[in-house]
Image (cartoon, rainbow, N blue to C red):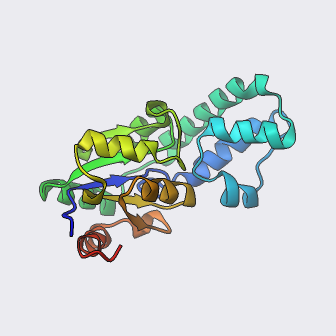
Amino acid sequence: MSTIKAVIFDMDGVLIEAKEWHYEALNRALALFGYEISRYDHLVTYDGLPTSKKLEMLSMEKGMPRRIHKFINELKQQYTVDKIFTDCHPVFAHEYALSTLKKEGYRIAVASNSIRHTIELMMEKSNLMEYLDFFLSNQDVHKPKPDPEIYTTAIQRLNLSPEECLVVEDNHNGIQAAKAAGAHVMEVGTVYDVNYVNIKKHIAMAENGRI
C-alpha cells in the first residue's frame, strides 16, 4: 500500500466552474467565421481539449481554414479573460480544502489543458494560488491530455511516484491521462464534488488499494 503525499487538480470543472466559459468564448469567436461547436459535440468530443486541438479538429472535420486559427485562438482567450474578471470568484469549500490539505503536509499542484495566463488568472481570482506548489499548462508539455505527459511531468516535478499521487479530474480526457500516468484518480461530476471530506475519503481509498 502507498501513502498519498500529493493531490494534483485539473482546473476547469474541478476547481473552477469554467467549462461553459470556454465553450461560450470559443463559439463566440468561431461565429465570426460561420462556425460552431454544438453542445453535443462539446460534451462528447471536445470537452477538456486545448483550443489549438479543437481548432485543428474543426479544420479536419469542417474544412475551417487553418490560416484563421491564430486569430480565433487569440479572440477566444480574450473572451475567456473577460469571463474570468466578471464570473470567477472564491469558493469557500475549495479554499478550505486546499488550505487544510496544505497544513496537513500534502503537496498541491494544478495540471490543466488551459494556457498559462488563464490558469494564473483563475487561481488568483479564486484565491487558490497561495496553496499551490506549482501549476502546469498546455504550454509546459508537448502533448496535451488525453496524453499522460502533463501528469507524468507533475509527478516527476513533485519527486514522487505515481502511487503517491491522487489526481482530481472531471472529464474522460483528463481521467484517461491521469490513469495512464499511473496515479490514483478521484473522478468528480461537478466542482461541488470537490471538498475536503471527499478528497480525504479518496485519499483513504487510494491508500487502502480501493481506487
Taking the spot 49% from the left edge, 36% from the top edge, the residue there is 138
- Report x, y in % for residue 33: 83, 33
Q: Quadrant of the N terminus?
A: bottom left
Determine whether 97 is above or below 78 in the image.
below
Q: Give the left or right position of residue 166, taking residue 100 as reference.
A: right
- Report x, y in % for residue 92: 31, 60
Question: Do we see residue 146 in this rendering?
Answer: yes
Taking the spot 74% from the left edge, 61% from the top edge, the residue there is 40
- Report x, y in % for residue 148: 46, 48
Identify the image quadrant of residue 95. bottom left
Identify the image quadrant of residue 76. top right
Taking the spot 74% from the left edge, 41% from the top edge, the residue there is 57
Q: Give the left or right position of residue 68, taking residue 181 as reference.
A: right
Determine whether 103 is above or below 75 in the image.
below
- Report x, y in % for residue 150: 43, 42
Determine whether 96 is above or below 31 in the image.
below
> Can you name the residue that lies furthest to the left here?
104
Taking the spot 44% from the left edge, 59% from the top edge, the residue there is 179
